[in-house]
Image (cartoon, helix red, strand yellow):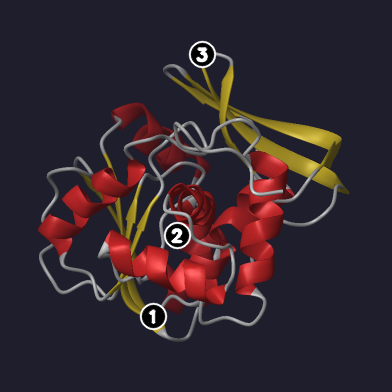
Amino acid sequence: LFIPRYRPVVRGDWDLRVVPLNMAPGYWSGPVLVRDMAVLLRNRESWMSTTPMEIESQEIGVRLARGHVLIYGLGMGWSAVASALRDAVTAVTVVERDPDVRALHEDLDIVAQLPAAARAKIRIVEGDAYSYVPDRPVDLLMPDIWLPLMNDGRVEEVRRMQANVGATAIYFWGQELEIARHAVAAGRALDEDGIARTIAAFDLPLIGPELPGYTEKLVAAARRWMRDRWLPGTTAPW
């Protein structure tokens, strides 16, 4: 996937830095050496980065993106520009409520690194993920507004967003871990059947499980990142 070139920028509480060399693990893959790793900090706390973990945790949504893609949370902007480069994508709308993040990107202008056809697909609008109503049909909703990798109310929050959007498909950040947590809490195995039944219970049009190896990726991510954050009353299935 395309990763933009970043440079240090500070706007308000937000500080974008570039780390020359860093060893970092993936979402489901092993650790690798990363050069020129960009990190977005807010009040010195890391919110996003170009680590393998961050890239892998969003790449399924980007690779399956098509039509009009609606992204909640501008962040470092890489998922928006990577989506715009997909031939199947016709438009990318990014909703961001923080004026400092929008100002940071006006200065950074990573969109300028794209070909003209991809640049023309992207628009950034002010709005709140829980109340924004799109002005055109949405083929894929990709929310990424959370600081923690998982939280107990995330599925319900995505349902609130979807009630306003009515997207044909959804891929939300950390969905593999939420599927794993809810599957185990419901007494389901972390296999294709258990994943499918859990998604059906979510009542959300999630994409990803149709890809080869999705179950293995989900289990690998849960093993690496879940730690003690299973839903109350449940424990790791391994």
Please state, as top left, top right, bottom left or bottom right, where the N terminus lies in the image.
bottom right
Q: Is residue 97 left or right of residue 87?
A: left
Q: Nearer the viewer, residue 9 or 152?
A: 152
Label 1 residue SS? loop
Q: Residues within 10 Å of mark 2 (few under 14, many from 20)?
A: many
User: In the image, residue 194 lies at what x, y percent?
Assistant: 49, 68
Earlier-in-chain disc, 2 versus 3: 3
Does the image show residue 208? no
Q: Is residue 44 above or below residue 33?
A: above
- Residue visible at 22% across and 71% down in the picture: 138
Q: Is residue 50 left or right of residue 58?
A: right
C-beta proximity under 8 Å, tags 1 and 3: no
Q: Which residue is mark 2?
A: 80
Q: Is residue 230 left or right of residue 212?
A: left
User: In the image, residue 117 lies at what x, y percent?
Assistant: 43, 78
Q: Is residue 27 above or below residue 92?
A: above
Q: Which residue is mark 1?
A: 66
User: In the image, residue 232 lies at what x, y percent?
Assistant: 44, 31
Q: Quadrant of residue 171?
A: bottom left
User: In the image, residue 29 lies at what x, y percent?
Assistant: 78, 57
Alpha-carbon distance for marks 1 and 3? Answer: 35 Å
C-beta proximity under 8 Å, tags 2 and 3: no
Q: Which residue is mark 3?
A: 43
Q: Nearer the viewer, residue 10 or 217?
A: 217
